[in-house]
Amino acid sequence: MAVAKRIRPLDLFTREEWDHVSRRSDLVGAWLVVHCWLVIGLAMAAAIWQPILIILAIPIIGARQLGLAVLMHEAAHGGLSSNTAMNAFLGHWLSGAPIGGSLKSYRPYHLQHHKYAQQPEDPDLILSAPFPVTKSSLRRKLVRDLTGQTFFKQRRNQFANAMGLGIRAEKGRPNRANTAREAVIPFVITNLVLLIGLSLLGYWWAYFVLWLLPLATWNQMITRLRNIAEHAVVPDNEDPMRHARTTRANLIERIFIAPYWVNYHCEHHMFMHLPCYQLAEAHRLLTRKGIDQQMEIQTGYLGVISRAASKPEALPA
């Protein structure tokens, strides 16, 4: 098996710089989870107060739901708390479970992605390998995302797997029914808590309009865009500075597409144990040294998506 190449931090940073950017804080990790839910809660409150704001609240909440996935990812690297139990609680019950994720099943899958990034054994290769695609193909995918079709298909398959329907056990692979149940049961529990809580406040409809709808639409689309930006059409699958992409995002993109520094994906793959809240500082240090010239970095998500949808349309027969 071809293991992805690694970079030694002290080849690029001084000891003082590395000690600075690699420093973790349990308080910051917990605050990020609180911040995510505060943004969701405030967006819901604003939309309940002025229903005309629902159209703005949906993408804001959908982006923070992606933020919850980012924080579950951070927990998979042990980055939310140095206390193992607290890291698991923050990463699973307060981050992954409400959006249908399971930290327990996600962690080994994701660490395999890091070990074999962009190699044949990479379990995420299926997300990047099909690109570039045609504009019409990407448009169809985004329409399926924004109309809830992707969400419905994923949840249907997840619930069917949890119930053991249509699954054949494969030798040497985890039991898919058990893995699905690890996500489905906490998803149902946490979503019932949300529904009951909003109902007790007198706004039962907000669960469907201001939680489930963003999760089924905007969150699906930007999750796809994030996946594309991270590894699709990268220039060199063998180069640890170029098999993942950093997208320099502006404020609007950070609000609606790329929360919690998820856009610094090249730095994350170069140094997978850096906490997410230190990635921007690592990027600044590398840029100051001119190392960014060796990395796969693009400006703005629009340009990245254009490259991913650059395959010519098929000529009519």
Image (cartoon, rainbow, N blue to C red):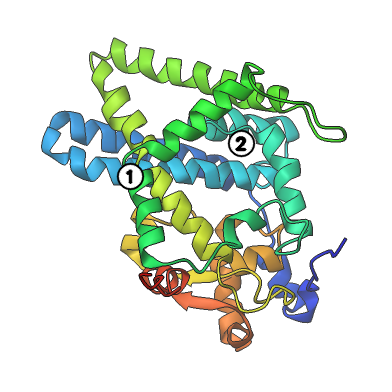
The answer to whether residue 237 is seen in the rendering is yes
What crowding class fits label 2: few (fewer than 14 Cα within 10 Å), some (14-19), or many (20 or more)?
many
**Drawn side of residue 75 relative to residue 209, left or right:** right
- As drawn, the label of residue 91 is 2
Disc 1 target residue: 146
In front: 66, or 4?
Answer: 4
- As drawn, the label of residue 238 is none
In front: 281, or 147?
Answer: 147
Q: Circle 2 sits in a helix, a strand or a loop, which is it?
A: helix
Residue 89: where, in percent of width, then height? Answer: 63, 29
Which residue is at 40% across, 20% downward? 194
Residue 65: where, in percent of width, then height? Answer: 43, 40
Could you say which quadrant of the image residue 51 lies in?
top left
Q: Is residue 162 above or below residue 268?
A: above
Residue 74: where, in percent of width, then height? Answer: 62, 47
Which residue is at 33% across, 49% downward? 143
